[in-house]
Image (spheres, rainbow, N blue to C red):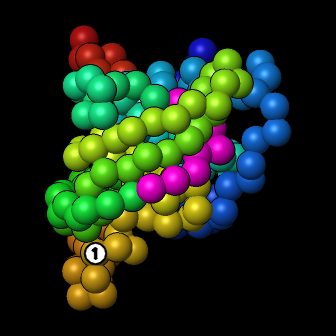
Amino acid sequence: MSLRQIHLLGSPVLRQRAQEIGVVGDEVRALIADLFETMRAANGVGLAANQVGVARRVAVVSVEGAGPEGGEHVLVNPVVLESEGAQVGEEGCLSIPDIYGDVRRADRLVLEATDERGVRRRIEARGFLARAIQHEIDHLDGILFIDRVGALKRRRLLAEWRKARKGQEGLLRDVVPEGASRL
Ligand SMILES: [Zn+2]
């Protein structure tokens, strides 16, 4: 396993529609392990392959809780079968650090996704887990949460982002595990 660099807003791979996975082999399993490791080190609740520069349909989520409210899920080639209800809540993104906005999402989802063993599974999700999964599936379609906040709010968030990024170059972020930078 290894930590991967996270691509930041402006990196073209975040806007690509990720390609379907054929067979879940060792290479895909290594990608899944790296996504989990990088997500945890960055204190995230989800991470999509686009965010580490790989435009393939693989994402992971980890939300506290059990059953449809939480848990760890591997999402290879996820397909939403049913979605209903609505919820509005704050989202952020490891590719747009320190920027947050309210996003409207479905409240309940039923989806199908392949896991790390290549088994197709049906997943039911509600509340925050449903939100996290919708955010990650958006990534696989090249969509970011700032695309879903409304035009005025988006302009404000982008201005905030540009201000925060002033003087910084590059569109890759090194993930440093918590505590590692403290001596
Ligand atoms: Zn994100």
Judge left or right: residue 148 versus residue 59.
Answer: left
The residue beneath circle 1 is 149
- Residue 128: image quadrant is top left
- Mark 1 CB in 8 Å range of ligand 1? no
Question: Is residue 86 depicted above or below 50 in this figure?
Answer: below
Horizontal placement of 57 versus 34: left or right? right
Q: Quadrant of residue 76?
A: top right
Q: Is residue 170 above or below residue 72?
A: below
Which residue is at 24% across, 88% downward? 152
| Camera-side residue of 130 and 55 | 130
Q: Nearer the viewer, residue 19 or 154?
A: 19
Q: Is residue 171 visible?
A: no
Identify the residue at horizontal 31%, vertical 51% (top origin).
108
Q: Quadrant of the N terminus?
A: top right
Residue 83 horizontal/vertical position (percent)? 39, 58
Residue 58 in the figure: left or right of residue 122: right
Q: Does any portion of residue 129 appear in the rendered image?
A: yes
Q: Nearer the viewer, residue 67 or 70?
A: 67
Residue 88 on the magenta span: no
What type is the residue that disc 1 sits on?
Val
Against 126, residue 180 (above or below) is: above
Q: In the rendered structure, which segment of residues is drawn in magenta?
A: 74-82
Residue plotted at (74% across, 53% down):
19
Prevailing secondary structure of the magenta residues: strand
